[in-house]
Amino acid sequence: MTVRALRPLTILTVILLAVGFGMAFFYAPLDVDQGFRQKIFYLHVPLGIVGLCGFVLGGIHGLINLRTGSPESDLRSYVTIHIAQIFSVMVLITGSIWGRTAWGHWWSWNEPFLVSFLIVFLMYCTYQPLRLSIDDPRRQARAASVFAVVAGVFVPINFAVVRLAAQQLHPRTLNSAAEGDMPGSVLLTFLLCFLAIAVLYATMVRYELLSKSTTFRLRALERRVGGDDLIPRRSSVPQA
Amino acid sequence: MRGLRITWAVLRKDLLLERRSFELLPAMALLAIGTMVVLKFSFDQDEISGSLAAGGLIVPLLFAALLGISRLFAGEERDAGIHQFLLSPAPPGAILAAKVAGLALVLAALEVVLVPAFGLLLLGPSLFPVLPQVVLVLILLDLTLATVGGLVAGMALGTRSRELIVPIMVVPLTIPALIAAQKALAPVLAPGADPLVWRWPAVLAIYAVVLALVGSVVGEYLVED
């Protein structure tokens, strides 16, 4: 894979993002209750859904790694989780911005989506420290894959439990869409933004995979030049 | 069947070692009761009940469990015991299953001390009428803590900073179980003792079963070499 091979996907991502968010600002009507602040949902909700799916995808790659021992699936698991972590930070930031404008404060412990997202985020924050604390690459891959599988299963359970336990202040975007409460223009814009964010995720994953495989090739060349005396750097990134 | 026999043998060995050395259980009990004393002064109330009481029972248990989890493979890591185990034809998952069962038993033994101490030190309403409900919720919570603990201790095997990795991984993974236990215990420990809401023990049981199933699929990979 080369940067040139990723060009069509990059162009598609840029077009989808431009069209999706252009529609969010200039085509989708203003929400009667929430006004302009509702526009953040076109970014916040897709980021959240795609981020969570990314964590589950990381678990699937982790399971493949456990079954096959293939370093590539460990790398895929690492990269999908890493990009999902970045999306999760964005979800927490955009959610807090929305909360500040809607509720008057940045955080609400009564809001199950916020709390469960924070729990998931905190859990995945331990992924890199776990990898970094294991020197043996094979053992690192195996422990990280087990973590990815357990955490991937944990994500939906955690959401269900927190949702059962707390009151719900957060608007239910997907419920509104399923019940047909969402106007057609809003639904179309939301779906397009969702597609744009999903493609953005896929593009970022492909770029990071490319970056890591290039780094591995570079290190292999360094080893050939430097010989066996070259001490490998400690890293949480899978070592091919 | 052979796996079960080996699990039982490892479990019996661990329990025997603990009975002879008697170091983990007293340390866990001291930490849990010490935490209760801290909570007593933090709450600044003579007696607590309801949600506060549920938290006052669960938090010391979690701290004690963290101590137990970080020591779970201590015996095997000493003198490369884990390598000797793996040289034998025993299935690798058996040792993890034994550790989970052992931790659940240690937590249950700890609660024999912890629950009366909680009744004496913190709780306002009498504990006796609601004891069966409290015991049921605690058993389910023990199973969940033990399963999470076994998996995390397995992941942390061979890491350079296990004492850092274990708590930061265990706490987020147990939050759904802690929420369910808190929601189950809060009405039971309230003045007048409302009946147990069965949804929460069910959530605890489902969480424990799902984790055990995941553990049975991936656990063997944790103790492979």
Image (cartoon, coloured by chain):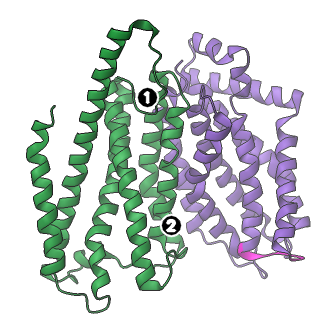
Colour assigned to chain B in the rendering is: purple
Front residue of this view, candidates B136 and B181: B181
Relative vertical location of residue A2 with respect to residue B133 in this rendering, above or below = above
Instruction: Measure the C-alpha gap from mark 1 to mark 2.
Output: 30 Å
Task: Give the residue displayed 31% in from the left and 91% down from the top.
Answer: A33
Lower position in the chain sequence, tag 1 or tag 2? 2
Front residue of this view, candidates A226 and B30: A226
Relative vertical location of residue A64 with respect to residue B64 in this rendering, above or below = above
State whether residue A183 appears in this view: yes
Res. A141 mark: 1
Give the green chain's letter.
A
Q: Main secondary structure of the magenta part?
A: loop
Q: Amino acid at mark 1?
A: Ala
Marks 1 & 2, CB-CB < 8 Å contact: no
**Position of residue A204 in the picture relative to residue A171 (left or right):** left
Task: Give the residue displayed 83% in from the left and 40% down from the top.
Answer: B25
Rendering coords of residue A3 (x, y %)? 15, 37
Which span of residues is magenta-colored? B45-51
Q: Determine the secondary structure under disc 1.
A: helix
**Position of residue B176 in the picture relative to residue A64 (left or right):** right
**Position of residue B20 in the picture relative to residue A135 (left or right):** right
Image quadrant for the C terminus of chain B? top right
